[in-house]
Image (cartoon, helix red, strand yellow):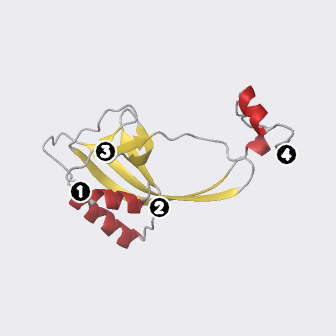
């Protein structure tokens, strides 16, 4: 989810909720303790220099159970962050601490902001000797797309 998308969603919500990938909700007394821009400048295992930039939201819970962050307040924090930190319409990454800090992507289902799982990946598989995954095609599909008349084989 990009920053513009969360802003659009906040404009129509009456309350904010975040949901973990397993369907559990982040306790509704959460705080957004940081909004920042993270720049990552790195070299992948194949020697290619890369840059990545994301907007980072950090969620945190305290023992102030009566606390509720309202959509208009989060929108003001986002707009201030955009101006002061010169944040563009970047992808959002969410940090949340359980036993350790977890990083999540973000999606929206119309009611809840969904924390989505993130995966590591090799960005230079061709350099590392990692075999390309082959899709499994049924004999019927193979016959329909690779018949001699199709011209694809």
In percent of width and height, residue 144 lies at 75, 35
Mark 2 and mark 4 in contact? Answer it, CB < 8 Å. Answer: no
Q: Disc 4 and disc 1: Cα gap in Å?
A: 55 Å
Characterize the local packing of mark 1: few (<14), some (14-19) or many (20 or more) Cα atoms within 10 angstroms: some
- Which of marks 3 and 4 precedes in the sequence? 3
In percent of width and height, residue 3 lies at 40, 60
Q: Disc 2 and disc 1: Cα gap in Å?
A: 20 Å
**Mark 2: which secondary structure?**
loop
Horizontal side of residue 74 vs 1, given as left or right? left
Quadrant of the image containing the C terminus: top right
Horizontal side of residue 68 vs 77, given as left or right? left
- Which of marks 1 and 3 precedes in the sequence? 1
- Which dot marks residue 112? 3
Q: Disc 2 and disc 4: Cα gap in Å?
A: 42 Å
The residue singled out by tag 4 in the image is 151
In percent of width and height, residue 149 lies at 85, 42
The residue singled out by tag 2 in the image is 90
């Amino acid at each position: 989810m990009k920053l513009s998308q969360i802003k659009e969603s906040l404009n129509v919500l009456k309350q904010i909720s975040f949901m973990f990938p397993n369907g559990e909700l982040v306790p509704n007394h959460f705080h957004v303790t940081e909004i920042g821009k993270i720049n990552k400048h790195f070299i992948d295992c194949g020697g290619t220099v890369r840059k990545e930039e994301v907007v980072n939201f950090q969620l945190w819970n305290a023992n102030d159970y009566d606390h509720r962050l309202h959509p208009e307040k989060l929108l003001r924090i986002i707009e201030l962050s955009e101006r002061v930190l010169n944040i563009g319409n970047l992808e959002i990454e969410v940090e949340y601490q359980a036993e350790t800090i977890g990083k999540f992507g973000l999606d929206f289902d119309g009611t809840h902001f969904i924390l989505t799982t993130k995966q590591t990946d090799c960005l230079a598989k061709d350099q590392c000797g990692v075999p390309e995954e082959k899709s499994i095609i049924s004999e019927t599909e193979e016959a329909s797309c690779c018949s001699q008349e199709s011209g694809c084989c």
